[in-house]
């Protein structure tokens, strides 16, 4: 009598000998209540070598996050039921992973709240899927660089170098004279390259207090640009994110 067919064999597994296929592809959790949008983003991410998890609401997103611990989360803030900001809080309570917010441009308040809760970046709807994939790669590179290297006392972005031990800034090899406040602002921005910082985040990190500094923050930024930018009227390094705050970028 011949034996019947055995149980189906999963990929990477053989009976009697089990082999495990180890994937090194970063995993992205997509959280959005628009299935068509998730379909498009998932395809672009998979085409670029990412593994993708997807959720259409907050509870499902948190459950998937706890189970799979993805490398990055793409999170829509305008979710039904549990809002994206609450999902972000719950995710952060489990594990500190990069989060990029997906948000309509009109939801400025939510965007600011999300950044203040620790989101690493945001993309406004409507967006290009290629732009989203580029942002994902950029944030992951930045995060992994920060994990693999001890925070150096010297940071370099383009032609700008800041040395926090010597308390010096050089621009294209020449010493730049900054006030203590300008130095602190530059140090904070260069410690978060590519990340938008809200006005409140800058206030907290610079350890400045009171409405007086808040009102003069734009003037401090303008004066700082005059000292480190090749053309302060068209900044290459310290860019304004309108309605949100400021961001340090690497010149292209």
Image (spheres, rainbow, N blue to C red):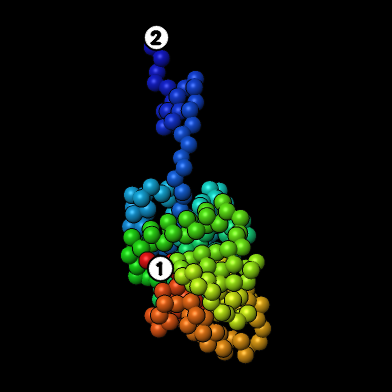
Residue at 61% x, 63% y: name it. 153
Residue at 55% x, 57% y: name it. 146
Q: Is residue 205 left or right of residue 76?
A: right
Q: Decide: is 230 above or below 119.
A: below
Residue at 47% x, 60% y: name it. 139
How far apart are the two marked residues, 1 and 2, measured between alpha carbons? 74 Å
Q: Is residue 10 left or right of residue 177?
A: left
| Most foreground residue, 103 or 150 | 150
Residue located beneath label 2 in the image? 1
Q: Is residue 79 visible?
A: no
Of the 4 image quadrants, the one containing the C terminus is: bottom left
- In the rendering, which numbered label is found on residue 251? 1
Residue 232's x, y, as percent? Answer: 43, 82
Instruction: Specify few, some or many for label 2: CA neighbours under 10 Å numbering under 14, 14-19, or 20 or more.
Output: few
Residue 209's x, y, as percent? Answer: 67, 83
Pick whichever of labels 1 and 2 is earlier in the sequence.
2
Quarter where residue 91 is shown: bottom right
């Amino acid at each position: 009598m011949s034996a019947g067919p055995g149980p189906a064999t999963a990929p990477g597994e053989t009976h009697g000998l089990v082999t495990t296929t180890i994937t090194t592809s970063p995993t992205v959790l997509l959280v959005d209540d628009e299935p068509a949008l998730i379909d498009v983003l998932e395809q672009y991410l998979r085409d670029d070598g990412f593994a993708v998890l997807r959720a259409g609401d907050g509870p499902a997103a948190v459950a998937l996050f706890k189970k799979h611990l993805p490398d990055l989360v793409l999170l829509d803030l305008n979710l039904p039921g549990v809002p994206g900001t609450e999902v972000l809080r719950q995710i952060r309570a489990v594990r500190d992973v990069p989060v990029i917010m997906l948000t309509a441009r009109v939801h400025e308040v939510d965007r600011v709240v999300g950044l203040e809760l620790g989101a690493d970046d945001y993309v406004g709807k409507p967006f290009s899927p290629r732009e989203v994939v580029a942002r994902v790669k950029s944030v992951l590179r930045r995060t992994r660089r920060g994990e693999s290297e001890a925070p150096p006392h010297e940071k370099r972005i383009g032609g700008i170098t800041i040395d926090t031990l010597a308390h010096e800034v050089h621009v294209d090899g020449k010493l730049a004279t900054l006030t203590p406040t300008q130095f602190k602002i530059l140090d904070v921005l260069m410690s978060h390259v590519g990340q938008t910082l809200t006005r409140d985040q800058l206030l907290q990190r610079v350890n400045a207090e009171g409405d007086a500094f808040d009102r003069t923050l734009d003037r401090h930024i303008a004066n700082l640009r005059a000292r480190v930018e090749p053309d302060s009227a068209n900044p290459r390094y310290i860019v304004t994110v309108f309605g949100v705050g400021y961001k340090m970028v690497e010149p292209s």
